[in-house]
Every structure is written in structure tokens, then in C-alpha cells.
Image (cartoon, rainbow, N blue to C red):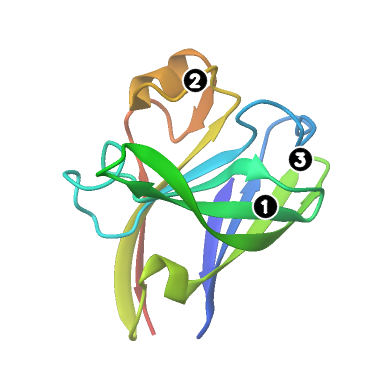
Amino acid sequence: TSKVAVDNNNVYFYAETNGALTPYTGHNWMLLFIDADKNHNTGWYGYDYLINKKVLGDKTTTLMHYNSNEHKWVEVANLNYRCVGKKIEIAVPRKYLGLKGDTFTFDFKWADNPSDLKDPISLCTAGDTAPNRRFNYRLIWKK
């Protein structure tokens, strides 16, 4: 299950897996990719933001932005998250994603434990993704 909620200040991402989540200390654990501008020509294969690439502890993780000039992920902010059993929820301030106003659209994808981040297909051939393969979820939000 994957859900998104929006309020005036934050976007909340929720995922529930089939089985219990692995420990947050794992390699590339519960990565969340976000294409905030819906432009495949920007970011890492279209993904502008990445959450959980660097998890700081059992309640704090990082939001990263892809720097196209340097071809690397750069830390933007620390985020709060909660994880229990097979459920995870992450709160992301809208301002960090550039999501302003009363209407916006963005794409996102979960990837768990891929061995590396060489391209989007490697996320699912050496890990698990939701949705599968090169597909994304799309949020269309109107207040």
C-alpha cells in the first residue's frame, strides 16, 4: 500500500509492505524518489529528490536533491519519519519540494534495498520497487 496526504505545510508519504520492514541500517533502505517538476530531463533520470539514502537514526532521515552539474545527491534537510513493523510514514515540508499553491502534481517511487543506483531498472532488478519497473505513482492534488 502506498498513500500520500497533504496539508498546508507538508506532504506525508505512507507505505505498508507485505512483510516486516528490514532494519533502517540496511543498504539503500526504503528509498523514496520524487519527481517534483515532472520533467524527465532534470534530476537523476527525472527524479529530483531522494529520501532515505542517508538515514540518521530510527526517527530522522535526510532529503537529498540531485545536483545535475556534479552528478550527485546533495543533502537538503533532515526529515522526521516513523517506522513500525511493516509500515513507514515520512513528513516532507512542501517548501523543500517547491510545491506551492492550491494545486500541484508530482510523481514518486519506492525502492527497497537495491544494490546500487546506476539507473532506474537497477532499482528493481537488484531490489524491490513500488510500483514495479519504470512505473511511478502520480499524485494530483487540489485543495
Q: Amino acid at mark 2?
A: Asp
Q: Is residue 142 above or below residue 88?
A: below
Give the residue displayed 75% in from the left and 34% down from the top: 21
**Direction from residue 108 to residue 16 in the image, left or right:** right
Name the residue carrying label 2.
Answer: 116
Q: Which residue is mark 1?
A: 61
- The amino acid type of the residue labelled 1 equals Thr
CA separation, marks 2 and 3? 23 Å
Compared with 140, 31 (above or below) is above
* Nearer-N-terminus badge (2/3): 3
The number of numbered badges drawn on the structure is: 3
Look at the numbered disc 3 and give the secondary structure of its residue.
loop
Q: Report how far apart the C-alphas of labels 1 and 2 lie in the structure.
A: 19 Å
Query: Foreground: 89 or 68?
Result: 68
Q: Position of residue 22 (x, y in %)?
A: 77, 29
Circle 1 residues within 10 Å: few <14, some 14–19, many ≥20? many
The x, y position of residue 34, in whole percent, is 40, 51
Label 1 secondary element: strand
Q: Viewed as shown, does residue 83 lie left or right of 35?
A: right
**Residue 107's x, y, as percent?**
34, 52
Q: Which mark is residue 86?
A: 3
Image spot of residue 63 (x, y percent) = 54, 55
Callout 2: SS: loop
Identify the residue shown where x is 34% and y is 24%. Answer: 119
Q: Are marks 2 and 3 in contact (CB under 8 Å)?
A: no
Q: Which part of the image, by quadrant, shows the N terminus?
A: top right
Q: Quadrant of the C terminus?
A: bottom left
Q: Nearer the viewer, mark 2 or mark 3?
A: 2
Q: Which residue is pictured at 31% across the width and 79% down the height?
A: 103
| Residue at 60% over, 25% down | 113
Q: Amino acid at mark 3?
A: Lys
Instruction: Tell me which numbered mark, 3 or 1, is placed earlier along the sequence.
Output: 1
